[in-house]
Image (cartoon, rainbow, N blue to C red):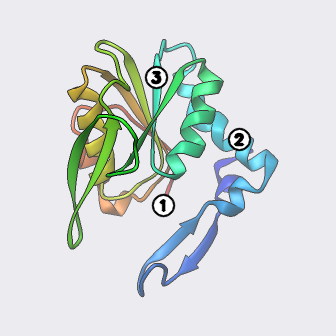
Amino acid sequence: MTMDDLKAKIRHVPDFPKPGILFYDITTLLQDPAGFHAAIDSLARPFTGQKIDLVVGIESRGFIFGSTVADRIGAGFSPIRKAGKLPSSCVRATYDLEYGTDSLEMHDDAVRPGQRVLIVDDLLATGGTARAATELVKRLGGLVHALSFLIELTALDGRSKLPGEQVHAVLKY
């Protein structure tokens, strides 16, 4: 399946969640067995045989992609969630939004020192959530091997918030 085939399976929703935004709705891709399989293959393939210990998925679509990538490459999985959603002791990273801030959390025992970690999410836009996830993994002593995204919105330059990090994006808009 080509990248154009994958792009064709993603629904474009204008003016969501607010006027002037074009939303890339991946639910239509997830519903398609061949498309979903190809998306997971494309996210995982560059990291097969790279001795990744743990895949970290960012809430919530990163759970879908991250857990399946972890299974595909033979790694464990750990979630990064919005603040207040995890039941045990956590570390927190705050990041900037267009108007205000938000926070992500991870259990403080989710990453062991020295573990090679792949961070997975559906979208790299401005880079704030990816940067916060990277900070959490490193704070716990993990080694960020790379970040893998299904979609990158290149005009928003999220990569610039991830200096020195290996970033893989399957589809670029």
In the picture, the quarter occupied by the N terminus is: top right
Q: Measured from the top left, where is residue 131 in percent x and y?
A: 26, 44
Q: Residue furthest right?
A: 33
Q: Quadrant of residue 90?
A: top left
Name which residue lies at 55% across and 66% down. Answer: 24
Which residue carries the number 3 mark?
A: 54
Which label's residue is closer to the chain start, 1 or 3? 3
Number of the front mark, 3 or 2: 3
Q: Measured from the top left, where is residue 136 in percent x and y?
A: 26, 35
Which residue carries the number 1 mark?
A: 173
User: Which is more toward the observer, 56 or 155?
Assistant: 56
Number of the front mark, 2 or 1: 2
Q: Amino acid at mark 1?
A: Tyr
Which labelled disc corresponds to residue 38?
Answer: 2
What's the CA distance linking mark 2 and mark 1? Answer: 18 Å
Q: Label 2's element?
A: helix
Q: How many marks?
A: 3
Which label's residue is closer to the chain start, 3 or 2? 2
Bin the neighbour count of mark 3 within 10 Å (Cα to Cα): few under 14, some 14-19, many 20 and up.
many
Bin the neighbour count of mark 2 within 10 Å (Cα to Cα): few under 14, some 14-19, many 20 and up.
some
Q: Measured from the top left, where is residue 71 in percent x and y?
A: 63, 25
What's the CA distance linking mark 3 and mark 2? Answer: 21 Å
Q: Label 1's element?
A: loop
Name which residue lies at 53% across and 22% down. Answer: 76
Q: Measured from the top left, where is residue 78 in percent x and y?
A: 46, 31
